[in-house]
Amino acid sequence: MSLTLDHIVIAVHDLDTTIADYTALGFNVQRGGDHPGRSTHNALVVFADGSYFELIAWKQPAPQERWWQLLQRHGEGIIDFALLPRSVADTVAQAGQRGLVLDGPLEGGRLRPDGERLHWQTARPPSTDLPFLCGDVTPRALRVPEGGARVHPNGALGVASLAVAVHNLDATLARYRALFGNGAHVAIGQPVPLPGQGLRLAVIAFGSSALVLSTAREATEDQVEGPYALVLRTADATQPLGALDRVRSHGARIEFERAGTPAPAVKRD
């Protein structure tokens, strides 16, 4: 099964302010439009590797939505991420055969500022340590702009790695194995302890990106599982490395590394 990183969701309070701040950080930000039937609107930061940030905000309160609840409870920042399948229905069926039940396919869409209507399908996982699926019905180029939209003054090329907090690393890895199957395009590393910190981590390498799964310091039920930080590759030798200002990134923990930096080593199971 072929799955690649589709996008990372960053929840914010005010979309216009966020667009201005991400532009000031050197990103090329594209307005995405509105989601019919919801109070959300978004903007996109699209990278050369095909992945993108979805900057999402609400025009009205939406207490029934999990993303809105996370924004109110924990503030702005990274709240979710999606993988791109060749077929949502096929991926759901294959994962189900391996014991992972996904909710979907579910219909979704967006109305772009130019009036173009986009349609896609999603599937939702049973736990927040997993990504959701997002597959296009209309051409993906309509949802994810190409060409100059993917060129950024800060030289950002794409997502090198995404950190995901989990409660039970062994259980989480079992769910990822059920999601990915035995495809040659993915390597799921064995859990290893992180010396001196009482943590364990594992790396899943797929496509040009990697997921770094780590146990939360206090694996309690109120500890949020899910993505919390990421590293971007940059081709700009003048772009400062390390973390961006989290005020301007609206809570998102984003760091830069030079393109060509070796990916984390992964020892297969």
Image (spheres, grey):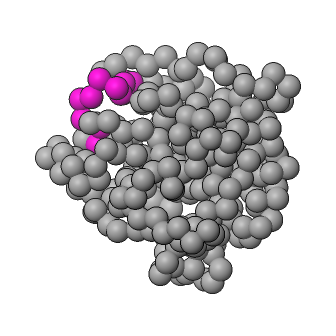
Q: Is residue 187 magenta?
A: yes
Residue drawn at (83%, 30%), measured in percent from left and top?
240
Q: Position of residue 146 (x, y in %)?
A: 58, 44
Q: How many marks?
A: 0
Q: Is residue 162 magenta?
A: no
Q: Is residue 252 left or right of residue 34?
A: right
Residue drawn at (54%, 26%), measured in percent from left and top?
194
Residue drawn at (61%, 68%), measured in percent from left and top?
114
Image quadrant holding the N terminus, namely: top left
Q: Position of residue 162 (x, y in %)?
A: 55, 38
- The magenta-colored residue range is 179-191
Q: Depth check: give the residue in front, 234 or 118.
A: 118
Main SS category, magenta section: loop
Res 51 quadrant in image = top right
Res 257 quadrant in image = top right
Q: Position of residue 130 (x, y in %)?
A: 40, 49
Q: Is residue 221 above or below residue 71?
A: above
